[in-house]
Image (spheres, grey):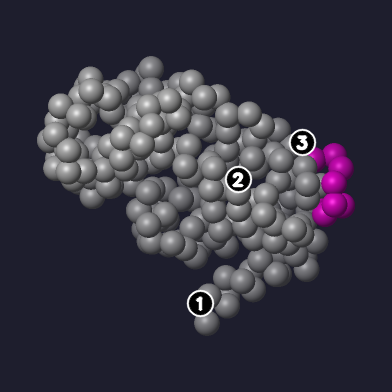
Amino acid sequence: MSTNESMWPGARSGRRFDEIAAAAKRVIIREGLEATTLRDISREGGFTTGVLTHHFPDKQALIAGVFAATSRAWIAEARAALQAATTVPELLSAFVAVSVPRDPERREEWRLWAEMWTYAGRDRAFVAELEAADALWEAEIRAMLERVRDEGLLPLAIDLDIQAAVLARLVDGLGLRAWLSGGWEPARNLLIGHLASLGLPMRVVAGLAAEGAGVLA
């Protein structure tokens, strides 16, 4: 899969861009998108508003940039985790781990995603940013499912494109609901249950479930 570099301003603008995006991300997660101001972000990052506006002329540009930079980093980490798996059980475990995180910082990021989805409802042009990020994530899921199928652990007739799209949207919904309610383990169990419904052998499903039980024990 190739990354559409035009979507990722940070790849062109260098370290300062990423520093600004990281500061904005922290403020948005802490305060919410509506309450966040350019001055708040400048204070958070320890730079002047002039530095900020050099990279982002207005808040709309900042929102797109923060989403792009955060999505880029998240996709890269998810891809690395999936590609590092040497067996199918490890691959599925990695998928569940990146989809329903246990790291508190990753869980907090769901406020950012929720804020961005809400913002897209007000700015239709921003929807293109979300769709581009979704396409990258779906491609990673499809590659994961293809590998599992080719190892003989999923039915040959499975529609990889449809299931990748369904799983991507399922992860969206589970993560958002878990962020709102704090029910991360139920979300994890539901994701494993859906994977089981695709035809995974019960021994593989039991292994994924046991990992969760071990954490809770």
User: Image quadrant of residue 17?
Assistant: top left
The residue that mark 2 highlights is 79
The residue that mark 3 highlights is 159
Residue lying farthest bottom? 217
In the rendered view, tell whether residue 31 sits above or below residue 193. above
Residue visible at 73% across and 61% down in the picture = 89
Q: Is residue 194 visible?
A: no
Query: Position of 17 compared to 135: left or right?
Result: left
The numbered mark at residue 28 is none
Crowding near the residue tagged with mark 1, few <14, some 14–19, many ≥20 C-alpha atoms within 10 Å: few
Amino acid of disc 2: Arg
Residue visible at 17% across and 38% down in the picture = 47
Q: Secondary structure at mark 2?
A: helix
Amino acid of disc 3: Asp
Q: Position of residue 118 (x, y in %)?
A: 33, 33
Q: Secondary structure at mark 1?
A: helix
Q: Which of the marked residues, 2 or 3, is nearer the chain's N terminus?
A: 2
Q: Position of residue 210 (x, y in %)?
A: 64, 73
Q: Which of the marked residues, 2 or 1, is nearer the chain's N terminus?
A: 2
Q: Which of the marked residues, 3 or 1, is nearer the chain's N terminus?
A: 3
Query: Position of 189 compared to 114: left or right?
Result: right
Given residues 68 and 113, the one toward you in this image is 68
Work out how far the residue at label 2 is from the one at label 3, CA to CA, in angstroms.
Answer: 21 Å
For the record, the magenta segment spans 150-158
In this rendering, which labeled residue sits more in front, label 2 or label 3?
2
The residue that mark 1 highlights is 216
Q: Position of residue 7 (x, y in %)?
A: 47, 24
